[in-house]
Image (cartoon, grey):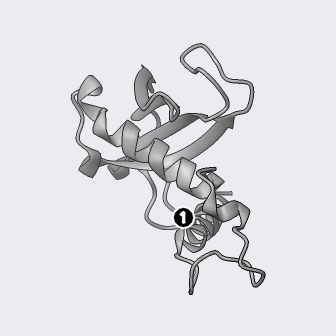
Amino acid sequence: MIGHTSSTLLALAALCLAACAPTPGGAVAPTGTKTMADHSIPTTASDLVEAVQLAERNFGQASASTDDYRLVQARRLLAGGEHCSGTRCWQLTFKLARLIPTSLSARLGAGGELFFTVDVERGEAILTGHGE
């Protein structure tokens, strides 16, 4: 299960990086018209990256350092939520890096999570809880 989770996180990271890569030669269609990419509609990857950055800037709410934590779960709130104004909202879970196994046979440490709800539209990240 842990190996599957790790490979899923790696695949997500690769997709995020690929989606954020610039388009060679711009985003103009052969007809000279602009494509949807020219509009200010964020992609899921860019929205998630912005959400993570907002949360990491607010680690001070938990008196924590970003160096000690790793993102382990990201979930988009499609219908908004208590701390969200629209659909550009995310629930992010960060876990203490020292509690994350470094091999398939190692055990996962309990607790050590920080939970954030991030409203990308407003540019706000709120610490909503701690793990054990």
Q: Quadrant of residue 59?
A: top left
The spot of residue 46 in percent (x, y) is 54, 55
Q: Name above or below for residue 4 compared with residue 28.
A: above
The spot of residue 83 in percent (x, y) is 54, 17
Task: Determine the residue positioned at 52% across, 76% down.
Answer: 22
Task: Determine the residue positioned at 38% across, 39% down.
Answer: 54
Task: Determine the residue positioned at 44% across, 52% down.
Answer: 100
> The C terminus is located in which quarter?
top left
Q: Amino acid at mark 1?
A: Ser
Q: Quadrant of residue 31?
A: bottom right
> Does the image show residue 108?
no
Task: Determine the residue positioned at 38% across, 46% down.
Answer: 53
| Of residues 46 and 68, the one drawn nearer to the viewer in this rendering | 46
**Extreme front residue here?**
32
The spot of residue 106 in percent (x, y) is 49, 59
The spot of residue 36 in percent (x, y) is 72, 61
> The N terminus is located in which quarter?
bottom right
In the image, 51: left or right of 65? right
Query: Element under label 1?
Result: loop
In the image, 35: left or right of 39? right
> Does the image show residue 110?
yes
The residue under label 1 is 105
Q: Name above or below for residue 126 compared with residue 32.
A: above
In the image, 29: left or right of 83? right
**Which class describes the residues within 10 Å of circle 1: few (<14), some (14-19), or many (20+)?**
few
Q: Name above or below for residue 69 compared with residue 45.
A: above
